[in-house]
Amino acid sequence: MTWITMKSGAAGSGGRSGRGRAPGLPAFTLMEMMLAVAVVALIAVGLAAVFGSIGDTVTAGRRVSEFNARAAQMEHQFRADFDRMTRDGFLVIRNQYATDTNGTIIEDVQRFPGDSQKRRRRIDEILFFARGRFTSAREPPDPRLVATSDAARIYYGHGVLLPDDDPAYTRPRVDDADLGELPGLIGGPNEYAGDWALVRHVTLLNPLSTALQKFPDPPPFGLDPRFAQDNEIRVSLQPAATYVFRSLAKELPDRLAITPGGGPALDWPRPAFESGIVDIATNDLTEIQQLVLAVGDPNGALGVFTPDRLRRDSDLRDMLGGTTDLGGRFARANANDLGDPVLGAMRAWMLNAFPANSAGQFGRARSRIRSEPAPTDFFGTLARTDRQDLKQLYALADQRMLSASRFLPNCTEFIVEWSFGQVDTRAGAPTEGQIIWHGMDRIVGQDAGGNDIYAARPYPLLPDATGQAIPVRPGTTYVTQSGKEMLWATASGLISGDQPIQSPSDSDYEAFFGYVDPSFPPNPLPIDPPAQDTVPWNWPTLIRVTVTLADPGDPSFEKTYQFVFETPAGASS
């Protein structure tokens, strides 16, 4: 370090004195010092701006990279699931705004506290069935017993968080149902859209075997295979619902408890999908189809439509048109006298297959499936867990399952729309030449003439303000008795019934795609009647998914992605 010194002393005789510079290095004046400080400050500010800009660029690049990785992940999973879709099941698309428990739209959903960009937000759902190789997400109590299936129900929709003061928060149970929370409800854990998550819930469909399950040797936990074989609520020692239909899963036999080594039976409550920790149902696609179509002997193999049960179960009566009489029109889905009650029953069954009562069926509060970002009491449960105690292993698996179906965290909006692949041919229409998409009314702007431009409209396509003609409705080709090919147009009421959707207060809209068109054959029959009894229900050829994600570190930043998927051959007529 260099020191600069100043000296004072005599400068001649006669009492005159003065100040002089010490020989050696010169000193800075005050002005020079101030100028130097200013220059250094300017340089520092400039460097800070440069480094800040670099930091912002790096942060933005990292954010783009992370968002693109999430987009690639979701596109890959959506495509894989839609490619495996099968018409051996049914397809339901529910368009819904975030609502309160009464079904009223929440107009000012916030992404975070203090958000100034409040608006309605869509929380759509889609449910369908797929074939492939599926494995339960639950950790098996014994690695030699893994639940698998070649068919599954696949559900996408927003999940909900449970309030931390709820008794079930830290101690989840497989029978937790009707959790009472919805995305957007003010004051709860699901109030802010930045905290929402899109759920992908896969339910294995495991038909029960007539033979005893072959247990490993030695048997796990000292279980007697005679008491631990698969049954209506247990597959590979995992909890299972009796049906994908919530109403049918309410009643269970009393004989299904596990008795380890002849000891006391384990507490085994009714498994419910709303809990978020159950992903197996012990029925197959054939049985599901029979139930939706209400075919076969009602007092035969299925045994769910008995008159006694119908008198007791109001849910089933509602789904079967409000009657306990299962004869006549309920015997065959293609009978000539099929009317709205039967079609309504089909739709009610399809809605009843959603994991939770999101549609508010039977006048009950709407709910969604539970999905937490992490186990709520993992370490506490782990500390209490004895690896040889089956009940404790179930508690540990329950904790891990709370986040197993959490597919896209920070998903602030989810929109699903569908198309028959038609192109709008109306001359001068705002969407002329574009694919016609169906779903809840969604306005994305206005044309030069002030007419609303719709991204999607209910089926059939409604005429615009100019009253232009509706394009020809798609349908299914059938053959008449004389061998002529005819087009059976898809009726407007088949897809969505008489749901009003023109009012801005409408909170939801549903589109159903089942097995056979119940409005066929025509009644009365034409002069040249059909040579066949049924035609397939017309399914969409395209499905469009729009997903909006928020930055977990900055929920004010959102990015929207849109994907279009073809339904596989055989899934569309």
Image: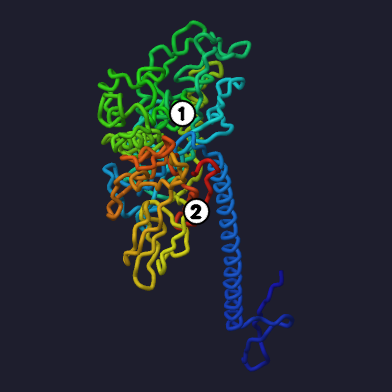
Identify the residue at image location x=56%, y=56%. 63
Q: Residue lying farthest right?
A: 24
- 353 left or right of 13? left
Q: Is residue 496 above or below residue 119?
A: above
Q: Is residue 541 above or below residue 325?
A: below
- Foreground of the two, 518 or 395: 518
The part of the image, by quadrant, that contains residue 158 is: top left
Quadrant (top left/top right/bottom left/bottom right) for the N terminus: bottom right
CB atoms of marks 2 and 1 within 8 Å: no
Taking the spot 31% from the left edge, 38% from the top edge, the residue there is 360
Q: Is residue 288 left or right of residue 14?
A: left
274 on left or right of 549:
left
Res. 414 visible in picture: no
**Residue situated in front as seen by the camera: 567 or 199:** 567
Which numbered tag is attached to residue 278?
1
Q: Which mark is residue 551?
A: 2
Residue 139's tag is none
Marks 2 and 1, the one that precedes in the sequence: 1
Which image quadrant for residue 225? Answer: top right
Q: Is residue 536 left or right of residue 177?
A: right
Kind of residue at disc 1: Val
Q: Nearer the viewer, residue 430 or 260?
A: 430
Residue drawn at point x = 66 percent, y = 81 percent: 27
Q: Position of residue 505 (x, y in %)?
A: 27, 52
Disc 2 packing (10 Å; few <14; some 14–19; many ≥20): some
Kind of residue at disc 2: Asp
Task: Return the x and y of residue 348 as percentages of the image width and height.
Answer: 34, 35
